Each structure stands twice: as structure tokens, then as C-alpha cells.
Image: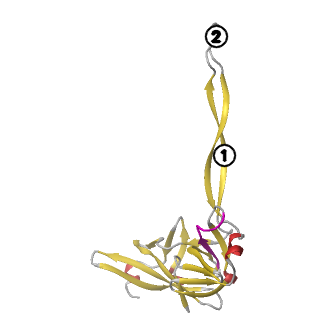
């Protein structure tokens, strides 16, 4: 087993290629299917790319090595898609002497944007420092994930708990996770049960 830090540095065969931002996980098989990496040296925006797990050659707690080149990553699917919504602004025409009240007319269009993360259907995105809720309240944040390197299946994850006197890390089996929703991991366990790990 090896640990993957969801915020690890990433290297391609021809040099550094940014940082991992997110792991995409199939919640039914617990398998990591993709990485989302960000490399601001890519030739064009968006700088985040979805990298299939079969491109991962090696992992360590703070480094992910890919078996592809940087230009291949640049051509992979963007993680962020920007959508443009046209909005119409009404403005009164200029008042000219003796012509009566101005008419409302469309004088031009402007656009608002929103960004959508392209998480594959049915999958969930696991990010570093996602909030973790026990069955009886907030209990910490997500740390590293323990992944079987042969199958890419997550077996455990590290829960980071902060206290007034410092912080503590607890490794929990993935079976402790009930579900993931809205950037929060919900556990089947209460805080007392977590304390036994």
C-alpha cells in the first residue's frame, strides 16, 4: 500500500508538471480513476487537467510521477469548463428635443460566467482539507489517502484532527465513510468510535 497526498507535486517524464488538486473516485469500487492536476506553465488556460490513473507510474506521499510528457498532459481534458451567459441590459435612448419620452432599447450585450467542474458522472471528487463530519458533528479534515498501487483502490484515509494543543492524525478504513456530498465527507462513526483508532 502507498499513501497519496491529494496535494502532491506531480512530475512527468520530461520534468515537473504542477500539483495534484483532486482525486476522482468511483464510490462503488473505491477506485481512484483520475487525478486533477494544475500546472500554470501550460500553454493556455484552464490550467487544470484530468489525468487518467493509468498514466500514473509511481506515487509517494508527496510526489506523483506520470508516465507521459508535459505536452500530453496539456492535451488532456480540462477539469474546469467556463460557461458564458448572455445578459441584456436595457438603457434609455438619448432624449432629443420635441421627440417625446425615450424608448427602452437594447444597447448591447454583456456576459456573466460560471465555472463547472467536470467530475465524471457517478464519481466523487476528494480534495485535501475537505471537511469531515462524524455522525455526531465535525471531527476534522481529509489528509492522505492510502491506495493499493496495483488496483488504485482506496483502502484507508487519514483524518486530520485539530486541537487546542496541536493536531492528530487518525487512519480510518474507507468503510467508515457513509457518503461524500458538497465538499464534505460524512462518516458512519461517531467521535467516540473514531477515538478508538
How many numbered callouts?
2
Q: Please give the residue where the numbered disc 2 appears in the rendered image.
A: 100
Query: Which residue corresponds to the image point at 54% horizontal and 79% vertical from the top-left?
Result: 9
Query: Which residue corresponds to the image point at 66% horizontal and 81% vertical from the top-left?
Result: 53
Q: How crowded is mark 1: few (under 14 residues within 10 Å), some or many (20 or more)?
A: few
Image coords of residue 177 (percent x, y): 52, 78
Colour convention of the picture? secondary structure
Q: Which of marks 2 and 1 is nearer the N terminus?
A: 1
Q: Circle 1 sits in a helix, a strand or a loop, which is it? A: strand
Magenta region: which residues?
33-43
Query: Which residue corresponds to the image point at 31% horizontal and 79% vertical from the top-left?
Result: 166
Is 91 or 15 nearer to us in this picture? 15
Q: Please give the residue where the numbered disc 1 appears in the rendered image.
A: 85
Q: Does residue 42 belong to the magenta stretch?
A: yes
Q: How crowded is mark 2: few (under 14 residues within 10 Å), some or many (20 or more)?
A: few
Q: Circle 2 sits in a helix, a strand or a loop, which is it? A: loop
State which quarter of the image contains the C terminus.
Answer: bottom left
Residue 4: quarter of image: bottom right
Q: Does residue 129 belong to the magenta stretch?
A: no
Is 24 or 66 nearer to us in this picture? 66
Is 45 or 172 nearer to us in this picture? 45
Residue 39: quarter of image: bottom right
Amino acid at each position: 500500500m502507498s499513501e497519496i497526498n491529494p496535494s502532491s507535486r506531480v512530475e512527468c517524464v520530461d520534468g515537473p508538471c504542477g500539483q495534484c488538486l483532486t482525486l476522482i473516485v468511483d464510490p462503488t469500487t473505491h477506485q481512484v480513476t483520475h487525478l486533477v492536476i494544475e500546472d500554470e506553465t501550460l500553454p493556455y488556460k484552464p490550467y487544470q487537467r484530468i489525468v487518467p490513473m493509468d498514466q500514473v507510474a509511481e506515487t509517494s506521499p508527496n510526489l506523483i510521477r506520470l508516465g507521459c510528457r508535459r505536452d500530453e498532459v496539456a492535451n488532456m481534458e480540462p477539469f474546469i469548463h467556463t460557461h458564458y451567459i448572455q445578459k441584456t441590459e436595457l438603457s434609455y435612448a438619448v432624449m432629443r428635443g420635441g421627440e417625446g419620452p425615450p424608448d427602452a432599447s437594447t444597447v448591447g450585450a454583456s456576459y456573466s460566467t460560471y465555472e463547472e467542474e467536470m467530475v465524471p458522472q457517478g464519481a466523487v471528487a476528494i480534495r485535501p482539507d475537505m471537511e469531515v463530519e462524524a455522525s455526531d458533528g465535525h471531527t476534522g479534515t481529509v489528509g492522505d489517502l492510502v491506495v493499493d498501487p496495483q488496483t488504485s483502490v482506496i483502502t484507508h484515509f487519514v483524518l486530520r484532527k485539530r486541537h487546542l494543543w496541536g493536531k492528530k492524525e487518525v487512519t480510518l478504513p474507507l468503510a467508515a465513510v457513509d457518503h461524500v456530498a458538497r465538499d464534505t465527507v460524512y462518516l458512519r462513526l461517531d467521535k467516540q468510535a473514531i477515538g478508538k483508532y
